Image: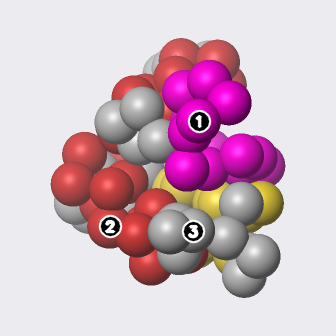
Amino acid sequence: MPIQAQDIEDLIRESFPDAKIDVQGDDGQHFAATVVDESFRGKNRVQQQRAVYAALKGKMDGPAGELHALALTTRAPE
């Protein structure tokens, strides 16, 4: 069963409950997400994105992962 944008948002929201999250994509495999959260302040982009990927709980792991591609934009609020 393909993953849906809302499923991705729900997974991210579990780790970042106060974040502004926008997930786009409707083919079940390729998505773009923007995550804006205060916890990213002072972290570099790699650290921010690793935190979001960890929140996805293995959904992108290997060829059997439900989520094939995620273009990810992360930042702290301005």
Lower position in the chain sequence, tag 2 or tag 3: 3
Lower position in the chain sequence, tag 1 or tag 2: 2
The residue type indicated by label 2 comes to Asp
Count how many numbered circles sit on residues in the image: 3
Magenta run includes residue 73: yes
The residue type indicated by label 1 comes to Ala
Q: What secondary structure is found at the residue carrying circle 3?
A: loop
The residue type indicated by label 3 comes to Pro
**Is 60 rendered above or below residue 66?**
above
The residue pinned by badge 1 equals: 64
Residue 2 at what x, y percent from top left?
57, 68
From which residue to which does the magenta span run?
60-74
Magenta run includes residue 58: no
Residue 48 at what x, y percent from top left?
53, 29
In this rendered view, identify the residue nearer to me: 12 or 62: 62
User: Which numbered dot is residue 2?
Assistant: 3
User: Which numbered dot is residue 10?
Assistant: 2
In this rendered view, identify the residue nearer to me: 43 or 28: 28
Q: What secondary structure is found at the residue carrying circle 2?
A: helix
